[in-house]
Image: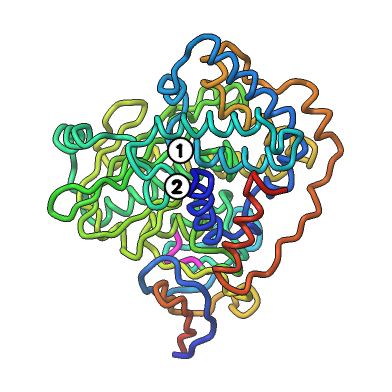
Amino acid sequence: MKKILKGLGVSTGQTQGKVKIIMESKRHPSFQEGDILVTRITDPTMVTLMAKAGAIICDIGGMTSHPSIVSREMGIPCVVATKKATKVLKDGMIVKVDGSKGVIYVLD
Amino acid sequence: MSWIDQFIKSYTQAVSDSDEEGWYPFDPYLFYPYFADLFLEKLIRAQKKAEERNISVKELAKTFAGPITLRGEIQFLFLDVKGSNYFQTREGGSLLDFFHNILKAKCTSDIYGFKSARIHTAPEIKRIAKSTPWQKPNLKQAQEVGKLISACSHLSWALYTDYCYLQWYEIFGPYELSQNRTLLIRQYSNFRPKEVWPHFKKFPYQSVNIYTIYKNVSIELDQWSHLKSKDNLIVAMENIAIKVNSRLVNDFKTINKIRKTIERSAQNLQNRFQKMDFEALKKKVVELRYYMYKDFFSKVGMSWRPEKEVWEKIKNKKLLPRKYPRFKNTDHAKKYWSQFIDPRRK
């Protein structure tokens, strides 16, 4: 297990799952329950994906940005302000997300 | 410390936790100044009418859903006054004091929103805790409630943007109950705003109210209704009650169906919003801001709709070219925002 990214942990909990990079608000039929939603910043077009996500990781955002508030309400880990999640993480990577410490690990 | 100083202190806490890059559809601080003079003029007329008709501050407070709506708007009114012809005028100051009085009439404590948004008295909370038909959710059901909260919040944001939603999505609390339990009441009161979104006239749900009791958690609400907690609210969810169109819904198959309908509508509306051209988007934001005051203007006998001069003020205008600094730390951010919003400073 290797630490790959650090940001601001805004919603407690740990989980692991498959990364799905979401750059646009379109239908994403390949997004499965428990996948890790990775994007620059979430917006309301992603509401259905967020309801399925096991965790959320964003490039930007603060303690009270959209993904942070929604993740806390849904009880899923969230890390924001990573600066480069959408560049460093790749579709299909299996990662572990620690929403308390704000750390993302890639699993071998 | 003056009320303005106290308000600013709470404001800087809220804004420093936020990220202005994420505000949508665009940064209101870079847009509201264009029509600030006209908006303030309308509010000052409303204030005069309220005084002429002897409408009490308490009655006016009832036209706003909760303290978060008022706090959210007061910060924008600070900015409006600051950048308009009403800067350092008697009318500008009087208008701010007027809304401050309405805010005071609305809250039972923590007026400026350092950690809460409370409008209920202790006896009212006792009655709610005792008389609400609570359900104890299992983990899956608690997750469904969390998703319902997300769906309703998303539809509110889609209908009303990131900063005009407060009148229609208020959270009240946290209220401390016995045995280390905490009550939050979420109120989504208008999913059929036909005046601003005609195709929502027949949306199946007018309102959703979600009552949740959590065990052994620490929850704060900042000045803008943002919930902060280091605890897992799904695991800690002990009791729930959900009302849709004022009727209790306790079957989770139905709750799931309602949630998915609301999610789909939020997604579709936000997609539609994102396809709007910039001129249409600006007009919609203006309309939504005025719409927040619908009940307030109606109370004093005025139409809420923006006057036609407002459209001329915003036509073909780009967002103001302000650049925020890269903050070294939270103290730096708070100092900046304090000066930015202070209506007594240019």
* Viewer-nearest residue: B61 or B228: B61
Chain label for disc 1: B
Q: What is the x, y in percent for residue B60?
A: 46, 22
Q: Residue at x 48, y 90 (%)?
A: A2
Q: What is the x, y in percent for residue A32?
A: 47, 63
Task: Kindly identify which residue carries mark 2.
Answer: B225
Q: Marks 2 and 1: CB-CB under 8 Å?
A: yes
Local SS, label 1: strand
Q: Residues within 10 Å of mark 1 (few under 14, many from 20)?
A: many
Q: Residues within 10 Å of mark 2 (few under 14, many from 20)?
A: many
Q: What is the x, y in percent for residue B26?
A: 69, 48
Q: Is residue B113 left or right of residue B269?
A: left
* Viewer-nearest residue: A38 or B36: B36
- Looking at the rendered structure, the kind of residue marked 1 is Tyr
Chain label for disc 2: B
Q: Is residue B178 left or right of residue B240?
A: left
Local SS, label 2: loop
* Viewer-nearest residue: B204 or A67: A67
- State whether residue A71 is above or below residue A91: above
Task: Kindly identify which residue carries mark 1.
Answer: B169
Q: Residue at x 21, y 49 (%)?
A: B137
- Looking at the rendered structure, the kind of residue marked 2 is Ser
Q: Quadrant of residue B138?
A: bottom left
The disc, 2 or 1, on the residue closer to the chain's N-terminal end is 1
Same chain assignment for discs 2 and 1? yes
